[in-house]
Image (cartoon, coloured by chain):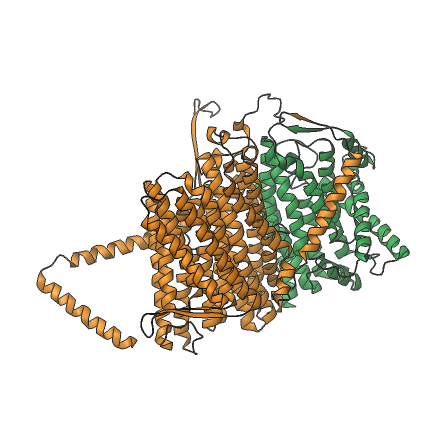
Chain colours: A orange, B green
């Protein structure tokens, strides 16, 4: 009863907020917007309560909301897995709403702002109901609502040509993902004859493989798995930061939910699926972070790092499938929980990073890291919160990111119990790639934090930046605290949920860190000289240091770019001309480094060109007289009837 | 309670002996270059002198510069609890986990690299950039080495590993020898020694670690130096406890613990001398040649895995 109340009440508040905002889109003022955002915030808290209740008690919840026809209906079923993802969605969305209270007022047009709030509300509710969906019909319905509303939000700054291009790119990719999903769902319907999400009976391996592949591609596009990832950096950098936080923190987790739901509960996985998921995961993780390292646009950097983290989650799922197929259920569980826990952790710290980045971008008016620097002194709170997010992402103990990576490491390291030597060697290679990924992530976020917040400002805008409003600090601060607490109490949390995992008790580690700090600090107070003095940085005798002399983002990542040159496909051009024949007196020169967009130029564009040629050909078919059109209609009807006969 | 005693004893011992190894390596290098070198207790003198000096901060720095020395030493001291040098304690929930041990070291490194960027000096930035690059490239080697160890000793807990290596004579096992080679390379890389880095110079072409801490002075510098020394001892202890664990005890009483301590000191001195001679034999190699060295270490450890898997 209480659960019903929470569910319906939350829904009403969301729709109320959305309706309110759309109806008064032209007029509504700050007060109305605030009211709607607070309503959304409380609705999210209701859903958080609802989902926590189910996660903790391991109970289930089901409700049939609206019956369209006999087989098409909006009905919901929430079990522990769905509730876990609802918990991710509602907690991060609540924080995004809190942050938006201050953030959204920085934008210009009143109508646009109202529209954004309305879309946000629909977006969040679509994600929540998608995860709760009991059948593929309502799942696809909310999937589309989620895609459409997010498309509109990406289009927020539609006057910029860049934004329009990004949004269109995103739209095409997201529709492709829906197409693949629909194909997979129809194939499942063909087998079971219903749209319910339940385990399907044993079918031919070929059909099973087709279903798996189309679902994997469908969910993979949305999750940003390489090579379907290209929309992420575009869409995340174009949209407002609160929306990037929602899209990166939450929306791609919804795709992960879909994948886990179908792999664990609906299909009976084959062994090669696990290997495939693991491979895609490893390469997404490694290439994601390698591309992130070269980015100077902070939001693109974060987007690539999301690709990396989705890769890590897929590694967990892949390991689960492999161990499960060999019957090592404990290890499989460890890997799966590692992957799922990483979904939660990534949602927390990535939205934290996107929100604080939003504050930074607002304060400096640029997304280019090269033009930042020294912000720690003018924006200390934002800086501190960004540091906490970076620490969690770089998997520093005792933050939450460490715990989930530790679980995956543990699962990997015990993979020697698998019999097949070939697979074993592959897993150990995967382990070393995973280690490389993890270390590169640390390097990437030293770069991100160090070059944005430390040293001296490298532009006038960065020099004039101001700390942001309290709600834009309060939101991220809650996330940072949760990141730390979830990490420290991870052992206790998992044992209270009934999972006995071989992970260290980080509460003890945290305690010993604090005690050691206390001891060292008091020792230093007792014995050391406490006088301090400020002076200039040593500059080899140059007395007036300026910001041109400090290390830049390109400089920082240069060694890594050089080592991984084959992956970036960098081309270094260095043309020099000399005044004399002996090439000793330099006249002029030109040097540049280019990186080659491998995925765009080798995969995306060829496909796009092919489709363009095809549609050119088809559009020629339209240039005919009436008789031919009638023939077309006849052919179409015949094909439809045949297709219907096959389906029903 | 018993763990507290262990923690206190182990930490104090490692803190006390670490500067000795640092000086010893310098002494050996001086000897092989035909110089006399600093006295054996020089590092102790330097540290105590640094504690008495005032701290100079650059005008450009933020909080990061001020908290990093403390974070560094704390993380490395807690990591040192995972590597017993006095005796192997019973199981303590959490300590000894290999991934935890490695990531505590990464924690320290993360903040050190940030501090390098903080003073807006070119040297610091260069040091951080190179340090993060080198540590990223060596990371797969480290994980594979410890996985190989885990495979060989059937556990991923450091205490268990040392206990097993103590009971079985692994010295004669070819896998252990291969792993020890890789561990030695890791020791060289992680403690910023030739051919990866040159701890002696302050020349921009050769330095990584020294560049990052260039802006530190006074007690803060003492803390940074101390944490570097402790880290070196801890990594040496891993190698010692795997390859030549004799003398280390699992049943602590005054006699056995003193034997352990003396044995560790002797083995540490031998290893430090070896490191000193190793450094003297090589020249600093180019930064972009380093991945080749790491590939060698990777090859050793991965071939151990292959060997163990196919045995």
Q: Is residue A280 left or right of residue A403?
A: left
As rendered, which of A534 and A586 lies closer to the eye?
A534
Residue A345, percent from left and from top: 55, 55
As rendered, which of A152 and A199 lies closer to the eye?
A152
Q: State the residue at coordinates (35%, 63%).
A: A141
Quadrant into which the C terminus of chain A falls: bottom left
- Outermost residue toward the bottom in this view: A202
Q: State the residue at coordinates (53%, 72%).
A: A325
Residue A648 vs B225, above or below: the answer is below
As rendered, which of B12 and A525 lies closer to the eye?
A525
Residue A405, percent from left and from top: 59, 56
Residue B271 visible in the shown view: yes
Residue A611 vs A358, above or below: the answer is below
Q: Is residue B42 left or right of residue A420?
A: right
As rendered, which of B153 and A489 lies closer to the eye?
A489
Tag count in the figure?
0
Residue B19, percent from left and from top: 79, 40
Residue B209, percent from left and from top: 65, 38
Residue A291 visible in the shown view: no
- Outermost residue toward the right in this view: B255
């Amino acid at each position: 009863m209480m659960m019903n109340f929470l569910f319906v009440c939350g829904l009403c508040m969301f729709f109320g907020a959305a309706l309110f905002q759309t109806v008064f889109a032209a007029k509504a003022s700050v007060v109305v917007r605030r009211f709607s955002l607070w309503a959304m915030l409380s609705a999210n808290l209701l859903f958080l309560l609802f989902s926590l209740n189910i996660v903790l008690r391991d109970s289930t919840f089901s409700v049939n909301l609206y019956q369209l026809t006999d087989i098409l209906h909006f009905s919901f079923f929430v079990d522990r897995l769905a509730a876990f993802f609802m918990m991710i969605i509602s907690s991060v969305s609540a924080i995004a709403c809190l942050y938006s209270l201050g953030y959204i007022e920085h934008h210009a047009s009143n109508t646009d702002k109202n529209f954004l709030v309305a879309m946000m509300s629909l977006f969040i509710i679509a994600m929540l109901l998608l995860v709760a969906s009991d059948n593929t019909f309502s799942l696809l319905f909310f999937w589309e609502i989620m895609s459409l509303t997010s498309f509109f939000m990406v289009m927020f700054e539609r006057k910029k040509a860049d934004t329009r291009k990004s949004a269109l790119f995103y739209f095409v990719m997201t529709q492709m993902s829906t197409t693949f999903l629909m194909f997979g769902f129809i194939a499942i319907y063909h087998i079971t004859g219903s749209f319910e999400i339940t385990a399907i009976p044993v079918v031919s391996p070929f059909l099973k493989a087709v279903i798996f592949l189309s679902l994997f591609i469908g969910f993979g596009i949305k999750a940003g798995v390489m090579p379907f990832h290209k929309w992420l950096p575009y869409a995340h950098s174009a949209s407002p930061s609160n929306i990037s936080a929602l899209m990166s923190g939450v929306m791609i987790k919804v795709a992960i939910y879909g994948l886990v739901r179908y792999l664990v509960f609906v299909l009976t996985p084959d062994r090669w699926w696990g290997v495939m998921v693991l491979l895609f995961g490893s390469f997404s993780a490694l290439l994601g972070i390698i591309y992130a390292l070269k980015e100077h646009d902070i939001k693109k950097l974060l987007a690539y790092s999301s690709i990396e983290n989705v890769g890590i989650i897929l590694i967990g799922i892949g390991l689960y499938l492999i161990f499960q197929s060999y019957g090592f259920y404990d290890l499989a569980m460890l890997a799966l929980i590692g992957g799922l826990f990483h979904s939660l952790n990534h949602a927390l710290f990535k939205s934290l990073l996107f929100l604080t980045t939003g504050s930074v971008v607002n304060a400096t008016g640029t997304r280019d890291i090269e033009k930042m620097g020294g912000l720690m002194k003018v924006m200390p709170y934002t800086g501190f919160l960004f540091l906490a997010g970076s620490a969690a992402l770089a998997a520093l103990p005792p933050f939450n990111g460490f715990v989930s990576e530790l679980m995956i490491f543990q699962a990997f390291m015990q993979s020697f119990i698998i019999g097949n030597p070939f697979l074993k060697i592959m897993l150990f290679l995967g382990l070393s790639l995973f280690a490389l990924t993890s270390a590169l992530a640390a390097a990437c976020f030293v770069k991100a934090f160090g070059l944005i917040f430390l040293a001296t400002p490298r532009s006038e805008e960065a020099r004039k930046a101001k700390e942001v409003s309290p709600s834009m600090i309060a939101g991220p601060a809650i996330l940072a605290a949760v990141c730390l607490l979830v990490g420290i109490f991870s052992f206790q949390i998992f044992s209270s949920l009934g999972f006995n995992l071989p992970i260290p008790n980080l509460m003890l580690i945290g305690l010993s860190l604090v005690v050691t700090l206390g001891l060292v600090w008091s020792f230093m107070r007792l014995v050391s000289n406490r006088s301090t003095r400020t002076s200039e940085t040593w500059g080899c005798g140059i007395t007036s240091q300026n910001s041109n002399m400090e290390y830049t983002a390109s400089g920082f990542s240069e060694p890594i770019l050089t080592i991984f040159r084959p992956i970036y496909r960098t081309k270094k051009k260095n043309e020099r001309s000399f005044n004399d024949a002996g090439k000793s007196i330099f006249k002029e020169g030109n040097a540049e480094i280019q990186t080659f967009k491998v995925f765009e130029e080798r995969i995306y564009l060829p496909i796009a060109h092919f489709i363009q040629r095809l549609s050119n050909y088809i559009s020629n078919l339209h240039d005919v007289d009436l008789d031919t059109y009638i023939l077309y209609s006849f052919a179409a009807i015949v094909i439809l009837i045949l297709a219907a006969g096959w389906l029903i | 309670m018993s763990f507290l005693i262990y923690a206190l004893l182990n930490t104090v011992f490692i803190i006390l002996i670490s500067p000795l190894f640092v000086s010893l390596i310098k002494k050996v290098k001086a000897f092989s270059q035909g110089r006399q070198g600093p006295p054996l207790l020089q590092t102790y003198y330097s540290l105590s002198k640094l504690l008495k000096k005032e701290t100079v901060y650059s005008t450009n720095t933020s909080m990061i510069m001020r908290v990093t020395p403390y974070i560094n030493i704390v993380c490395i001291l807690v990591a040192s609890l995972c590597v017993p040098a006095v005796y192997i304690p019973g199981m303590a929930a959490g300590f000894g986990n290999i991934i935890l041990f490695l990531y505590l070291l990464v924690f320290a490194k993360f903040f050190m690299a940030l501090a390098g960027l903080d003073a807006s000096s070119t040297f610091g930035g260069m040091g951080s950039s190179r340090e993060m690059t080198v540590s990223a490239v060596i990371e797969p080697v480290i994980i594979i080495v410890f996985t190989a160890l885990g495979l060989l000793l059937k556990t991923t807990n450091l205490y268990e590993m040392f206990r097993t290596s103590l009971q079985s004579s692994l010295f004669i096992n070819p896998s252990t020898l291969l792993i020890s080679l890789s561990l030695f390379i890791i020791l060289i890389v992680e403690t910023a020694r030739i051919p990866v880095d040159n701890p002696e110079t302050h020349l921009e072409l050769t330095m990584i670690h020294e560049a990052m801490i260039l802006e530190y002075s006074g007690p803060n510098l003492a803390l940074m130096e101390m944490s570097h020394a402790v880290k070196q001892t801890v990594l040496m202890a891993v190698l010692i406890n795997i390859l030549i664990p004799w003398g280390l005890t699992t049943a602590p009483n005054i006699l056995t613990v003193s034997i352990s301590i003396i044995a560790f000191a002797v083995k540490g001195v031998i290893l430090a001398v070896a490191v000193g001679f190793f450094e003297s034999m090589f020249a600093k190699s180019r930064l972009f040649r380093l991945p080749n060295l790491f590939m060698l270490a990777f090859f050793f450890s991965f071939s151990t895995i292959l060997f163990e898997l196919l045995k």
